[in-house]
Image (cartoon, rainbow, N blue to C red):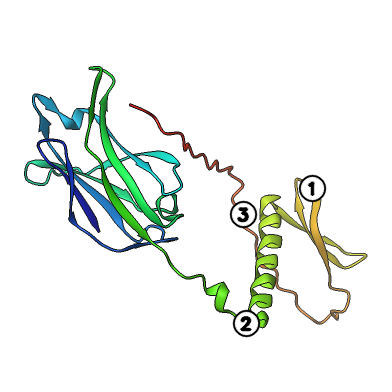
Amino acid sequence: MYVIKMNDDKSLIATIKSSIYQGERNADTLSFLIPTTYEDKNIADCTLLLRYILPNGVGRSEELELDAIPYKNYYRYRLKVSTRLTDISGAIELWVSAVDFNDNYILKSGTTHIDVLPTKKVSDYLSDESLDELDKMGARLSQLSAVVATKADNLAYDEDKRLLQLTSEGKGIGNSVDISSATTDEVIDVDPIDIDDGDKDDISNDELITF
């Protein structure tokens, strides 16, 4: 866990630090302690946004999640540390903005930094044989992903040719499986296929909002 507190003068200070390494995903949580009120404004009425600039100069913005129970005189906001933060090693400059569009209210904190530590790539130390096996595994995963992407919904059997075939909306997809070598006494077990055909959109917005 990495805890950052906003002081009464809106400066940010890290009260608890942990090592964050390049490429980590959802292993750590950034927690922000924000005073419940600033002057007469209840911060819970605002949307709290984390603004940050990656080591390569790219700016990003994330909405922080508010805990239901305040911590003493502070609201606690959380953000899981994803690869959006850890993709590149180096110092990340960050600050928070509290925004309430109904009251035309914007509060900005001061800035602080967190460090993403570099890690070694195991691929740099693997033998050629091990790398070949990884390449083969990657190819098999790509083929599987391609089949899943076609949204197979049934399994057809050609009795004359003795071929099994994945189908989608009645059309064959992928390669058929020849079972002609099986004798009449052999039992062929086929696992049912359950593939979710719901579309999932992965939308990211890397534009740095300036307020």
Residue in the image at 41% along x and 47% along y:
54
Q: Which label belongs to residue 40?
A: none
Residue 76 x %, y %: 19, 45
Residue 207 x %, y %: 46, 34
Question: Quadrant location of residue 209?
Answer: top left
- Is mark 1 in CB contact (under 8 Å) with mark 2? no
- Between the residue at mark 1 and the residue at mark 3, the CA separation in whole angstroms equals 16 Å
- Between the residue at mark 1 and the residue at mark 2, the CA separation in whole angstroms equals 45 Å
Of callouts 2 and 3, the N-terminal one: 2
Please tell me how crowded label 3 is: few (under 14), some (14-19), or many (20+) other residues with Cα within 10 Å.
few
Please tell me how crowded label 2 is: few (under 14), some (14-19), or many (20+) other residues with Cα within 10 Å.
few
Residue on which disc 1 sits: 170
Residue 10 x %, y %: 16, 36
Q: Is residue 65 left or right of residue 186?
A: left
Camera-side residue: 23 or 115?
115
Of callouts 1 and 3, the N-terminal one: 1
Quadrant in which the C terminus appears: top left
Question: Quadrant location of residue 51?
Answer: top left
Camera-side residue: 14 or 135?
14
Q: Amino acid at mark 3?
A: Ile
Quadrant in which the N terminus appears: bottom left
Q: Is residue 24 left or right of residue 141?
A: left
Which residue is at the far right? 160
Q: Point out the frontmost of discs 2 and 3.
A: 2
Question: Quadrant location of residue 89?
Answer: bottom left
Residue in the image at 45% along x and 55% along y:
88
Residue on which disc 3 sits: 195
Residue in the image at 59% along x and 50% along y:
196
Residue on which disc 2 sits: 127
Q: Point out the frontmost of discs 1 and 3.
A: 3
Q: Point out the frontmost of discs 1 and 2.
A: 2
Residue in the image at 11% along x and 35% along y:
9
